[in-house]
Image (tube, helix red, strand yellow):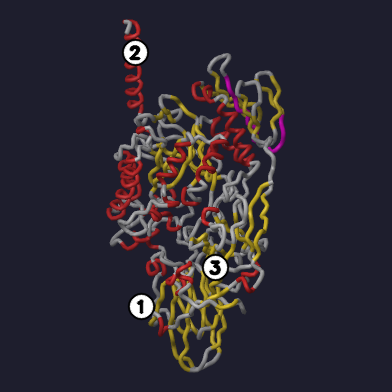
Amino acid sequence: MEQKEKLVVKCRWWWLLALLLLTAALGGAQGGNVTYDGRSLIINGEHKILFSGSIHYPRSTPEMWPSLISKAKEGGIDVIQTYVFWNLHEPQQGQYDFSGRRDVVRFIKEIQARGLYVTLRIGPYIESEWTYGGLPVWLHDIPGIVFRSDNEPFKYQMQKFTTKIVNLMKSHNLYASQGGPIILSQIENEYANVEAAFHERGPSYVRWAAQTAVGLHTGVPWAMCKQDDAPGPVINACNGMECGNTFKGPNSPHKPSIWTENWTSFYQAFGNEPYLRSAENIAYNVALFIAKKGSYVNYYMYHGGTNFGRTAAAFMITAYYDEAPLDEYGLIRQPKWGHLRDLHAAIKSCSKTLLSATQTTLSLGRQQEAYVFRKSKTQCAAFLENRENKEVTVPFFRIPYKLPPKSISILPDCRRVAFNTAKVSAKHSTRTMNPVVHFKSAQQWELYKEAIPNFARTTPRANGLVDQISTAKDKSDYLWYTFRFRHSSSRSFLSAFSQGHVLHAFVNGVLAGSAHGTHNDVPFTMERNIKLRKGINHISFLSATVGLPDSGAFLERKVAGLRNVRVDGRDFTHHTWGYQVGLLGEKLQIYTVTGSRKVQWKRLGRLHPLTWYKTTFDAPPGNNPVALDLGSMGKGEVWVNGESIGRYWVSFVTAKGKPSQRWYHIPRSLLKPSGNLLILFEEETGNPRGISLDTVTWS
């Protein structure tokens, strides 16, 4: 090698070493191939503006993952963000499961194969409208535990699981420092929402969590969302819909401005209408965040998917963020997908200028501003913002620009408008549900009536009403409460108070009434006039949870189920009660081929509450997604070939008189060409003859 070339190489190495030392001195995280400074994440030495999309691996199927990731990439997404779901991976203490939809390693490798990065939000508390916030219910039974606080029993379990996940990622070389796609991790989740409730044990827990995460040496930065005082090298991030306005900014000049959750719609509970957020509004707020020197925006969700089985949190519908750019079925929702794709392209066309130039803000009017990034006479980019609800014309560098109401124009060269957030060029499309199989004939159905237990047939016993969460331990949504008493008159008044979520009362084996709470008002009281017989009477309550709570301080203290019972004013709360966790049909697993043979099915006749229904069907031809139209049903759960596709609650209508959710996704990978087993458990008196099997298309 020539002497001159050796000198150049030597200088380059000294320059790199000096840069690394300077970054460390300024407080930038050292993460191998990923670092950061006050402007952005730095990947392989290059500053990056990154667009990210949340896609959660258990809310879809492995067969769907490649298509979802590819469509995200086509939409201009650079990073896929996912939570890690503790209660899925460790359903029993010390017993781990990373199979099927739980295969987070396979999911990340699929992302890597398509050339995208990963943000891994380990939590391990995640909220996410996921039952118990992602925490396994067995934590509840650990003596002295207080979730998410400076509490040794909880910290031990949290550190153990977090270390398990980090080591799993390392074993597959998935961190960027190992050549993998993971560029950012998250510890905890929106802790500021509950921190004050824990007093001095809140801030100390935050410091411990940050120290624990950094001490795992992943080689990539860590973040905390909604945690303005994220300690040390951990990046504080914003969640919400308007982080360009609401984010206080990084808590250090050496940390970048990042947005971990830009809600593309909002979660939906049973009884509520869907939240519709326009593509224009999302684009406006993203453009504003970038204009104010933001460098990472994650769409929550980019694909919401499906809360299969009993994974949804309290009162959450099975469809999750269906209004995202990719709908529940993984199909492109226009114009949201296309408008954001165009936004990403416009910003990326001037990203080098945005990341290297000095930003200045110019007033263009009373509610109009220009955010200008100028590096030289030839290198300039600008965002022209109009906050008014009317169109205005503003001068910028002596050129007039028309700005639509509530919009931002992006000028990659400070002259030409490449994109305006209010002008949508992507076509609007409509989703169509196409019925292909009907189940109208009574001959297509068989039924099995769930037994209604009485006090004599239920064990264990207790002198008082037990908490449903700690008794059922998430093995079932259902808990039977039974008691018996002697009465002398025929007509009486029953009052029952419950803290979650649904209650069916049976008097001497006959349904006497039902009641339920709501997402915003969980406790409720059921009051009914009932008929009793002289002598011994049996009252049985079936209490049903619709997911477990997912948020709030002291989650381990939250309870559900029956709390107080009175008959004609007589208090039976501390009476002797019998209990039964779950249903007989669940115990026998009659939703499977093998289990369904264990009971005597009958022909469809009169409709009764607490009834199992069974039929078979052939898979529709083609590759279009498949959904069950359960518009004729009430409330329950549905299985296809032994796999639960979720809870339904069609009878809980919105203020407009429509179900919050009518169609329920059946992933194609669950289906066989013919002879698919369909089982429903119906709590009410829904009619299965109104069900149809539909395919899903957009046009």
Q: Amino acid at mark 2?
A: Val
Sequence-first disc among 1 and 3? 1
CA neighbours of label 1 inside 10 A, class few (<14), some (14 to 19), many (20+) = few
What kind of element bears circle 3? strand
Examine the structure image and report whether residue 391 is included in the region drawn in magenta: yes
Q: Which residue position holds label 3?
A: 680
- The answer to which image quadrant residue 442 occupies is bottom right
Q: Which mark is residue 460?
A: 1
Question: Is 268 on the left or on the right of 165, as rendered?
Answer: right
Question: Is 492 on the left or on the right of 693, as rendered?
Answer: left
Residue 699, image x, y percentages: 69, 46
CA neighbours of label 3 inside 10 A, class few (<14), some (14 to 19), many (20+) = many
State which region is magenta. 380-392
Between circles 3 and 2, the one closer to the viewer is 3
Between circles 1 and 2, the one closer to the viewer is 2
Q: Residue at 71% across / 36% down in the picture?
A: 390
Q: Amino acid at mark 1?
A: Pro
What kind of element bears circle 1? loop
Q: Which residue position holds label 2?
A: 9
